[in-house]
Image: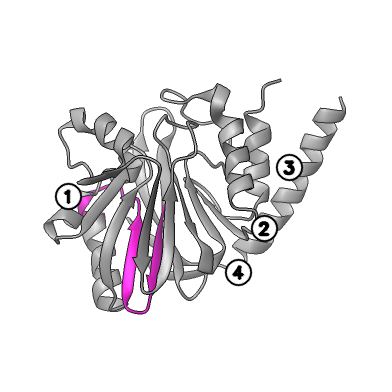
């Protein structure tokens, strides 16, 4: 019973924190198919949409980091045409050179719009597990693989991409930007009041442990971006850990 009361209090606290954060959002770009939300001068969430059988039209988050004329995108929009709009925003409107695109895991809401990045000559990176899982689809897959961690120098700042364990999928990674004290967790991190969502490729036994590893690895986090829904702080990690905790 004490566990249930603790979870309810945690849920209420997270909701108020995320409400305050959502009120401070600035829309940097907005169309029917793509929204770009500024979190800081250098960090942006890109939102595109995926039509699903089980959950209808789903808003899917990705991340953009701009620094000193260089940029990295984490996860592509869901369709090629939307990726082309995102590429134009980064390179023409913001006038940054896109050095890399990093894929969080093998689902279409992460790499459905990868081909335009390849057409533009942009290097693509993913966990080697992601490349293996995505290959049978016949669509574009990331060109460069890593096993545990990939460091990218973006305008003099290091962007860390790390595999810490299975959760939403067996290959999901997280992306950490130390200059922003920010984590893009993708679909392994849930937004406030979110359900467990699609579990067809999930490891629900390992999920909470993986989230705990993230919290231990990055204790200074201030901003956390989930795969779907509003961004928040470390309360999102706490919520997700509790959601999948073995009862």
Marks 4/2: CA–CA distance: 9 Å
Res. 36 visible in picture: no
Looking at this view, name the residue that lies furthest to the left: 119
Mark carried by residue 115: 1
The vertical placement of 96 against 57, above or below, is below
**Dot 2: within a 10 Å radius of its alpha carbon, few (fewer than 14), some, or many (20 or more) residues?**
some
**Dot 4: within a 10 Å radius of its alpha carbon, few (fewer than 14), some, or many (20 or more) residues?**
few
Q: Residue at x 60, y 69 (%)?
A: 24
Camera-near label (1 vs 2) is: 1
Q: Going by the image, does 88 lie left or right of 198?
A: left
Camera-near label (2 vs 3) is: 3
Q: Residue at x 56, y 41 (%)?
A: 190
Element under disc 1: helix
Q: Which residues are magenta?
A: 62-82
Residue beneath disc 2: 19
Marks 3/1: CA–CA distance: 39 Å
Is 70 inside the magenta-drawn segment?
Answer: yes
| Precedes in sequence: disc 3 or disc 1 | 3
Q: Quadrant of residue 107?
A: top left
Residue beneath disc 3: 11
Q: Nearer the viewer, residue 157 or 58?
A: 157
**Dot 1: within a 10 Å radius of its alpha carbon, few (fewer than 14), some, or many (20 or more) residues?**
many
Q: Quadrant of residue 213?
A: top right
Q: Residue at x 36, y 66 (%)?
A: 153
Mark carried by residue 24: 4
**Dot 3: within a 10 Å radius of its alpha carbon, few (fewer than 14), some, or many (20 or more) residues?**
some
Marks 3/4: CA–CA distance: 21 Å
Q: Please state the horizontal and vertical placement of residue 149, each as a whole percent of the image.
A: 40, 47
Element under disc 3: helix
Element under disc 4: loop
| Precedes in sequence: disc 1 or disc 2 | 2
Q: Residue at x 82, y 36 (%)?
A: 6
């Amino acid at each position: 019973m004490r566990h249930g009361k603790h979870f309810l209090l945690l849920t209420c606290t997270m909701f108020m924190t995320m409400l305050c954060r959502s009120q401070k959002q600035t829309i940097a770009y907005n169309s029917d198919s793509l929204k770009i939300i500024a979190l800081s001068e250098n960090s942006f969430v890109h939102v595109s949409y995926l039509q699903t059988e089980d959950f209808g039209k789903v808003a899917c988050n990705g991340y953009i980091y701009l620094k000193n004329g260089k940029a990295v995108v984490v996860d592509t929009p869901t369709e090629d045409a939307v990726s082309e709009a995102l590429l134009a925003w980064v390179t023409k409107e913001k006038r940054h050179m896109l050095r890399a695109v990093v894929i969080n895991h093998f689902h279409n809401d992460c790499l459905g719009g990868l081909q335009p990045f390849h057409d533009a000559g942009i290097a693509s990176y993913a966990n080697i597990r992601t490349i293996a899982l995505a290959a049978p689809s016949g669509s574009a897959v990331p060109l460069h693989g890593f096993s545990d961690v990939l460091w990218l120098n973006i305008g003099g700042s290091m962007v860390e991409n790390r595999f810490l364990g299975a959760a939403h999928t067996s290959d999901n990674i997280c992306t950490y930007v130390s200059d922003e004290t920010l984590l893009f967790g993708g679909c392994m991190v849930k937004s406030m009041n979110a359900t467990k969502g699609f579990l067809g490729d999930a490891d629900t036994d390992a999920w909470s442990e993986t989230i705990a590893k993230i919290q231990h690895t990055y204790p200074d986090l201030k901003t956390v971006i989930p795969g779907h829904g509003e961004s928040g702080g470390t309360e999102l990690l706490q919520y997700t850990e509790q959601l999948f905790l073995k009862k």
